Amino acid sequence: MLLDQIIFFIFAAIALAGAVLVVTSRNAVHSAIWLITTLLATAGIYLLLKAEFLFAVQIILYVGGIVVLFIFVIMLVNLDVAVRQIQFNRQTSVALILALAVGGMLPVAHYFLGRQIELPPERVAPVGPNTEQVGQVLFSQYMVPFEIASVLLLVAMIGAVVMAKRRV
Amino acid sequence: MDALLQYYSQPQHYLPLIFILVIVAVLPLLAGYVVLMERKIMADMQARLGPMRVGPHGLLQPLADALKLLIKEDIIPEEADKIVFLLAPLISVTAAMTAYAAIPFGPGFQIAEMNIGLLFVLAISSMGVFGIVLAGWASNNHYSLLGALRGAAQVVSYEVAAGLAVVAAVLLAGTLSTRQMVLAQIDPASGTGVWFVFLAPVAFFIFVVASVAETNRAPFDLPEAESELVAGYMTEYSGFRWSIFFLAEYAAMIVVASLGTILFLGGWARPFAATPVFDFLDYAPPVLLGGAGLYCLYRLLKQPALWQKVVMLIFAGILLLLAGAVALPLTGAQLGAVHVADWKPAIHGGFWFVCKVAAYIYFFMWIRFTFPRYRFDQLMRLGWHFLIPVALVNVFAMGAALILRSRLAGGWGLEWVVAANLVTLLFAGLFAWLAEKRPAAQAVESEY
């Protein structure tokens, strides 16, 4: 499907460009706006893979919830200083060596593991209404990890509340 | 190219395009007339007349307002973040209007039927808050920023309550598709056949309160509280951009009203749709619309100027035409090869849907002119200490009731659903009592 590929590359380009701009923007609010762009493009890719439940959750949780809180905090905290500071550590030579080393490791690892790079089959068949399926799998097969993650988040939340309360 | 033409020659592919055009074209007009309705209702509740000058009974006021806003000077503050300042209203209005894609206005009138329709509407409309937040920040104005902060905190808080309230309806319908949800409320075979407002009244109440807060309407209109913050996040906006914010606000209002209608009020269904005894209600749409048209004709005689008589005549004509359109399917007439009676669900569905949405919006206005504005800490307390716990209990109780119904298969299971609501009410009383006992928040955070 040519159209699918074109749409995928558009979304992928938006996501990558947005991600780069999140890091390079001087203004924290601009970074947050680019983060929204990246998250939306990622949501679009989920939709392309027929994972519509993930698409909706991505937007509701990350865009509608977490980024709103990010922006909320950015506005409360005075970030004028950050705008004027140098944002990047200009150790280009070290960074270049590290990047090349990591890049070189990938083919080496691939060679020694002796595995072909396998692309997923041309097209994953739609697996039907995946809201139900995500629910089924989450609450039967992955029950324990799910509960552990919930407890972990609960602990983190209580910790945040306790720490915030102490300051007042 | 041929493939494209082939694709769009099929009704299921070109109809959505027409629907999109209709919605985008009609919505601004509709929003304008909702504003007129609001001003008229406000005037009525305050025992005065409201707009009377432009057109008979102010019927052309929305058009005059739109024209005024379009030709007003567009001011962008010197110190504003220009791009974000220009972007913010667009985000608001895009979020509000995209949400219509999944809303079924009638059995056939829906742009996209998807199996996560409800989540789609919630997700897209939750992005509207960025318009408020970024507008407030980009204006580089303290009042605007305060409005933006309030908006962000308020919308994020009440989205939780609204989301949890919606779960009750999702549990009852057993689907996330907006169309299937309405069908579950119409047809006893595919669902309960009862409007969910009767099965989950507590959830409906929470949804209504949360939807008022989410659309920043009085008594929860703190992001734009004019007595404290000038106009909140909209302070620096003027002319066309300001009107776009206004459009977004009313479009979002129509979205939540449609959502409430779909989830709890039976969508496009006629009252008692499955009961043949009440079939005489099918005559209500033509009678109501025709009556309104005739009343316009009666008022026409009392208009002082000729042009006002002409405007009144046009409005009467529109109403009588609509009355004719809804009456046509009842007559069994034949239009060419098409049997018009087959269109009855579509035409009458649209009528009932608009009626319910209008009633919901009327309720919004009613409470706006009835209750004084909340203080911000009171608003947060109501959300976090009352609505969210009650909504959580409601989800648990409703889930338990539905499981008990399926396990102890005994008849319809109404008693379990009623019990779930009673349990929720009990807890609501408990939470209210606890909130009363708790000392008023001493640390009203100074930022607000």
Image (tube, helix red, strand yellow):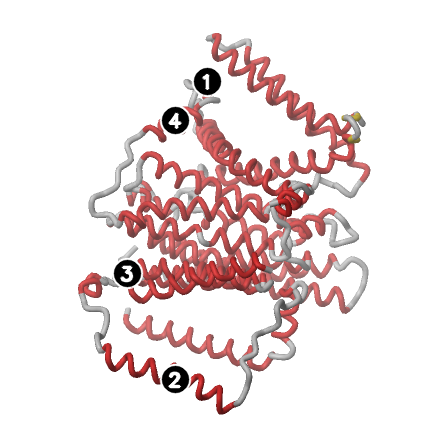
Can residue B445 be seen in this snapshot? no
Label 3: which secondary element? helix
- Residue A76, numbered circle: 3
Q: Residues within 10 Å of mark 4 (few under 14, many from 20)?
A: few
- Residue A104, numbered circle: 2
Residue sitting at x 64%, y 62%: B398
Label 3 and label 2: CA atoms lie apart by: 44 Å
Label 1 and label 3: CA atoms lie apart by: 48 Å
Label 4 and label 1: CA atoms lie apart by: 15 Å
Q: Residues within 10 Å of mark 2 (few under 14, many from 20)?
A: few
Q: Position of residue B153 (x, y in %)?
A: 38, 57
Classify residue B424 by image quadrant: bottom right
Label 4 and label 3: CA atoms lie apart by: 38 Å
Residue sitting at x 20%, y 61%: A80
- Viewed as shown, does residue B186 lie left or right of B398? right
Which chain letter goes with mark 1? B
Can residue B422 be seen in this snapshot? yes
Q: Height in image: B349 above or below A86?
A: above
* Labels 1 and 3 within one chain: no
Residue sitting at x 30%, y 49%: B83
- Viewed as shown, does residue A31 lie left or right of B37? left
Tell me the amino acid under the disc marked 2. Gly
Nearer mark to the viewer, of 2 and 4: 2
Classify residue A21 by image quadrant: bottom left
Q: Kindly identify which residue carries mark 4.
A: B67
Q: Position of residue B80 (x, y in %)?
A: 24, 48
Q: Kindly identify which residue carries mark 1.
A: B55
Tell me the amino acid under the disc marked 1. Gly
